[in-house]
Image (tube, grey):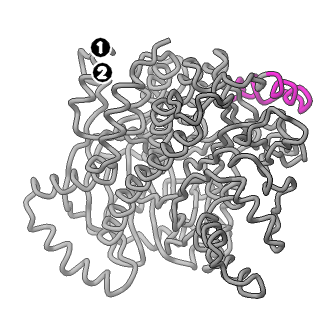
Amino acid sequence: MRHLATLIGRRSTKDRKLIRFFSSSNPAGNGIRVAIIGGGVSGLSTALQLAPLVEKGLIAEPIEIYERSCLASSPDVMRNTDSGKDATNSTHSAGSGAIGRDIGVGIWSTALEPFRTHRTSYKELIQKLEHLGQYVEKVGYRTPKGDWLTKTKLSLSSSLQPNLNIDDLDAAQTSSADPSLLFIRENDFIKSLHEAAIAEQEKGTIQLHYATDGQDESTHVDSIVLPDITKNGSVLGYSGQLQFKDGSISSTDYHMVISADGMKSTLRTQYSGYDCFIKKWKAGIEPSLKGLTPKWKDEQLAEKLSIEDRNYVVFRGITPLKSDGVSFQTWGEGRNMRFALVGMSHPTNDKGPERSEKQVWFATICDEIICSKKDPEERKELLVKSFQEWHDPIRQLIESTPAEEILMERGVGHKHSLQPVLNLAEVMHYQACHSEMDNAASISPIQYPGPGCILLFAGDAYMTVDPVLAQGFTIGMEAASDLAVTLESCLGQNGKEHKNSQQPFDSKIVREALLERNHRRFGRVMCLIRSTELVQSLAQPNSEFAGILTKNFVRPAMALVPSFIKEAAFSVVMKYSLGYYGNYTKVHADTDRTTTRKNND
C-alpha cells in the first residue's frame, strides 16, 4: 500500500483542495457530476463500473471518491469488547475500510463477471484477483460429530478453463449456469481495487481523495448542502455540494452523490427514511407537532435505520494448518453455533510462483461470557472449550491461531434496505420546518427550484446483510454494475420537458429508472435474506428446543435423503440466494452482456 499512499495519500490539505477544485470543474452539458463517499469495496467498485460512462460523455470527468481514512492507517477493529445486549455498537468490526483486514473473504462470480471485459483496468483487476486468491471447488456440510450431511462441487471460473481465449469469455459465461466462489485476503482484494482505480485515475475517469493523516478531516463528508441559487444563477436545482468535517465545502456541485461509507453511514442517518413522513406531512395527516410528533417520528426513523443484533458473535482466524482440500461447514445443535473452514492460498511474494497455503476459519456462537472477556487468551480458551467436542480439525484450527489474531465481531445487520433519496430538497425542507431536528438546512429549500441532488446508497450503507452466505461484498459489487447499466440506458434519453433544458440529463427519466433499479435491488436482497434465514434455521439453532429438534429429527432425516437430491437442493438454494431465479438476474445479466462487455479501451 506504500506506493498508493505516495500517489494519493501524501498531499497536503491545501494541495488536495486545489486538485479537487480544478479536476472537478466541468461545464454544464458535459454529463452528470458524480461523487462517491467511501473508498472501500463498494465505493471503488461503483467508480470502476461507472468509469466507461465518463469516456462516453454521460458522466462528467472525473468521478470523485472521498475517503475519510488515511491509507497509512489500519481499520479500527474492536477486539476487546463489552458484554451484553447493549454492546452491539462496540463489538462489531468497523468494517473493511479503505485498506482491509488480514482475513479471508469470499467473492461470488456474479460480482466478478461484469469486470470480465477487454477494458485494461478490468482485465488487470481480474488477473490480480485470481492470482492473489483461490477458487473454492470441493465443499460439504457436516454434523458436530463429523458425519457428512452432503458434499458437492462449485464451478471454477470460466477464465480458468483450459484452452479458452478471452474472446470466448462471453460465450463461456453465457452458457455457464453455475456460480463460482473466489476466496482471497480482504486486504489483497481492496488493494487490487485501489490499483484498478489508480489506473483509471491516470486516464482521468476517476479522482481519489484520501486523508493525509488521522487528523485530516478535509475528505470526511459530513453533510450535503444545496447550492445558493441567489449567488449562482447557473444552479438549476438538481445538484448539491459536499460539506466536510473541517467545515469546508466542495467547489463542485454534484448531480449524484453515492453514499458507500459503511454500516454507520453519515448520509444514511441524516437523509434517508423520510418519505413516509413527507407524504403524510403534505397530505396534512401527520400527528400534531405538540408532543406526539417527536416520539412518533423518532420511533419510525429508529425502525428504518436500526441495526439488528443477530444474537451471535463471529470469530475469524487464519492458520497454516493443513487440510484435506475439502472446505466445510459444520452445523451446530444449539447456541447459534456453527463452524466453517475454507482453504485459501496466496503468493508468498510478488515475483515468484511460490504460494502459501492457509486455512480460513470462522465460528459463530451465542455466549456473552466469551464476549465479555477482554483478554484475547481467555476468549480463545473459552472458544476452544466450547468447540472441543466437535470433530477434528476444529479444535486444532482454533488452537493453532494466535489469540491476538482472532477477530471477534458481533453478527449484526440492518433491518431495512433504503431506496434512493430523490427529493433531497424536500427532506431538508421537512427538517427545517420541524424545529426539533438537529440537522435543519442552512439554506431553506422552501424556495429551491428543484429536488436537489440524487442520493444513492451502496454496499453496507444500503443494507448490511448477515454474513452467513458470504455475499456482503458480492451484493455491493453487483449493485455497482447494475447502476452503470441503469445510467447508461437512461442518461442518453430526453423527454419533452427536457428538450430546451441546460441540464445534462433528464431528471424525470433518471429518477424513474433509479426507482425501477431499486425494486430490482430489493428483490435481489430478498433472495439472499430468505436463503440466509433458511440456512440459519438448519445450521445455527439458537434455542435448546430447536437444537433437540435439529439433532434428533432434521439431521437424521437429511442423512436418509440420497446425495444427488441434496446436491441439487444445495445448488438451488445457492443460486436462489445469488438472484439466479428472479427478475433481477434476467435484467442484470442480459443488459451486462450486451452493454458493459462492449467497453474497450
Q: Give the range drawn in magenta.
A: 1-22
Q: Can residue 492 be seen in this view?
A: yes
Percent coordinates x, y for residue 567 in the rendering: 16, 53
The majority secondary structure of the magenta stretch comes to helix
Using the image, tell me which numbered label, if any, was put on residue 349: none
Give amino acid for label 1.
Asn
Query: Within the image, what quadrant is residue 22 found in?
Result: top right
Percent coordinates x, y for residue 515 in the rendering: 49, 50
User: In the displayed structure, would residue 257 be above or below residue 287?
Assistant: above
User: Which residue is at 32% across, 24% downward?
Assistant: 159
Give amino acid for label 2.
Leu
Confirm or deny contact between disc 2 and disc 1 (CB under 8 A).
Answer: yes
User: Which residue is at 29% across, 13% downward?
Assistant: 165
Q: Mark 2 points at which residue?
A: 169
Asked whether, in this view, residue 414 is left or right of residue 341, the answer is right
Task: Count up the numbered dots.
Answer: 2
